[in-house]
């Protein structure tokens, strides 16, 4: 949408508050906490959608990114008891749990030898016996085998636990992890920062300040990271905006975040199964408003295994410019929670088609958004699965 067209849409808005917010957005002025809440409460999907789509186009044109990665989940046993998580019951039911050795994880890494993946994403439960030393050895082994593979690993929940057990400060722990091969942090573990909700849904793991401190420390060491928000359960709109506000403030200081990923709460097989899931309209509004609120985050990503590929494709017209990757999945966390995709996997060709159908340009990226290939220039018959 061109500037003149978006201006017409804002001018036609009857609600004066929403008109003023729209005006700020198209003048590239920051919107306030109250503006964010007002967008959630009062704005129509077409209004926030058009503004977010305009903003996305201003930032990225038609480029829509994906990457080729694979996931490793070292364990599904977890000492914590987040109510929304299908893992939390496993500590009490150890017979359903798994715990991979370094050799088993290296077998997974080696199974990608010769394949065009650029990133390994490592995240899992918090096993009481796994230590910082174990994960440092794992990262050293991966780097010794395939030095150019980007290691995006561990949430502050896992790191905080490892550092406490190893009796090292966050600064020292992050320095050791970086030195051993940790390249960046994924966005998990953030959930909802506000204590009114966090104490109900995940009381016993790292709190908001602990999460933010670990990301801040990573940024100060020159690493980048992502941030998530778990939406669509018992939180109110003000908690979503509060969460984004805390992220926006840290990003103003460090500029270390790459990507924001709203995660849709799924209610299968967890203690919150009586909480209904959000509608598609609510999903699209969440993506659009996060694009508008987080004006200092370069990218907004739709994580298709949780959202379903159809809704993920739609989000590309509601502020999203990244659709994660060709997750070739052994990952259980999402299928256990009731994601659309029981065994998430999408080939490069499927991803490229999904992006092209939305009239966007599919760009394969590295973790840090370096362009690897423009797939609009490649004949589909030549695309390797
Ligand atoms: O923090 C757990 C979420 C997250 C459920 O940085 C659930 O590129 C919905 O953060 N319903 C981990 N979500 C996953 C994550 C992630 C995923 C993909 C890419 C990146 C990235 C990060 O999964 C947890 C939690 O918020 N989660 N249970 C559930 N029932
Ligand atoms: Fe453990 Fe993470 Fe699940 Fe919480 S969300 S119970 S920390 S695996």
Image (cartoon, helix red, strand yellow):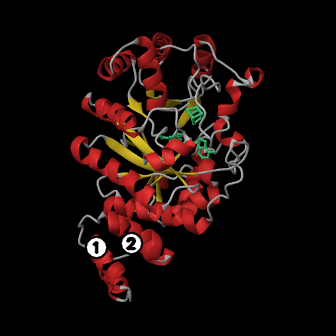
Please tell me which residue lies in front, 353 or 130. 130
Ligand 1 image position (quadrant):
top right
Pointer 2: residues within 10 angstroms few (<14), some, or many (20+)? many
Nearest to the observer: residue 189 or residue 177: 189
Regarding residue 381, the answer to whether it shows in the image is no
Whether residue 315 is visible here, answered yes or no, is: yes
Q: Position of residue 58 (x, y in %)?
A: 32, 65
**Quadrant where the N terminus lies?**
bottom left
Residue 124 horizontal/vertical position (percent): 57, 29
67 or 181, which is in the foreground?
A: 181
Query: In the drawing, does residue 79 fall left or right of residue 43?
Result: right
Q: Quadrant of residue 78?
A: top right
Which quadrant is the C terminus positioned in?
top right
Q: Quadrant of residue 85?
A: top right
Return the residue at label 1.
Answer: 26
Q: Is residue 341 above or below residue 224?
A: below
Q: Is residue 94 above or below residue 115?
A: above
Taking the spot 61% from the left edge, 54% from the top edge, the residue there is 307
| Image coords of residue 289 (percent x, y) | 42, 64
Q: Secondary structure at mark 1?
A: helix
Q: Residue at x 43, y 25 (%)?
A: 160
Q: Earlier in the sequence, mark 2 or mark 1?
A: 1
Residue at image location 63% in from the left, 60% down from the top? 310
Q: Is residue 326 above or below residue 182?
A: below
Q: Are marks 2 and 1 in contact (CB under 8 Å)?
A: yes
Mark 2–mark 1 Cα distance, whole angstroms, equals 8 Å
Q: Give the label on residue 232, or none.
A: none
């Amino acid at each position: 949408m061109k500037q003149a067209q978006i201006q017409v849409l804002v001018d036609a808005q009857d609600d004066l508050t929403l008109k003023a917010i729209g005006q700020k957005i198209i003048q590239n002025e920051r919107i306030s906490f109250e503006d964010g809440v007002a967008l959630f409460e009062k704005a129509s999907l077409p209004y926030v959608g058009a503004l977010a789509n305009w903003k996305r186009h201003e930032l990225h044109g038609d480029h829509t990114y994906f990457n080729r990665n694979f996931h490793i989940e070292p364990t599904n046993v977890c000492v914590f008891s987040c109510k929304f998580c299908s893992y939390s019951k496993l500590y009490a039911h150890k017979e359903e749990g798994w715990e991979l050795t370094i050799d088993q994880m290296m077998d997974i890494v080696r199974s990608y030898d010769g394949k065009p993946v650029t990133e390994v994403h490592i995240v899992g439960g918090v096993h009481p016996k796994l230590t910082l030393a174990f994960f440092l050895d794992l990262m050293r082994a991966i780097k010794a085998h395939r030095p150019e593979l980007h290691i995006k690993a561990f949430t502050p929940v896992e790191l905080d636990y490892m550092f406490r057990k190893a009796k090292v400060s966050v600064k020292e722990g992050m320095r050791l992890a970086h030195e051993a091969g940790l390249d960046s942090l994924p966005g998990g573990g953030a959930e909802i920062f506000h204590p009114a909700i966090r104490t109900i849904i995940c009381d016993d793991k790292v709190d908001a300040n602990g999460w933010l401190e670990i990301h801040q420390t990573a940024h100060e060491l020159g690493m980048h990271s992502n941030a998530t928000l778990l939406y669509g359960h018992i939180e109110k709109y003000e908690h979503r905006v509060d969460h984004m506000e805390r992220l926006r403030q840290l990003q103003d200081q460090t500029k270390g975040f790459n990507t924001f990923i709203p995660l849709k709460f799924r209610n299968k097989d967890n203690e919150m199964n009586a909480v209904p899931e959000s509608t598609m309209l609510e999903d699209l509004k969440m993506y659009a408003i996060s694009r508008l609120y987080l004006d200092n985050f370069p990218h907004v990503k739709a994580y298709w295994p949780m959202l379903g590929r159809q809704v993920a494709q739609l989000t590309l017209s509601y502020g999203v410019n990244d659709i994660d990757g060709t997750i070739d999945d052994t990952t259980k966390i999402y299928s256990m929670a009731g994601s659309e995709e029981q065994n998430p996997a999408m080939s490069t060709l499927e991803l490229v088609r999904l992006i092209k159908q939305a009239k966007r340009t599919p760009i394969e990226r590295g973790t840090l958004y370096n362009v690897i290939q423009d797939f609009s220039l490649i004949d589909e018959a030549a695309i390797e699965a």
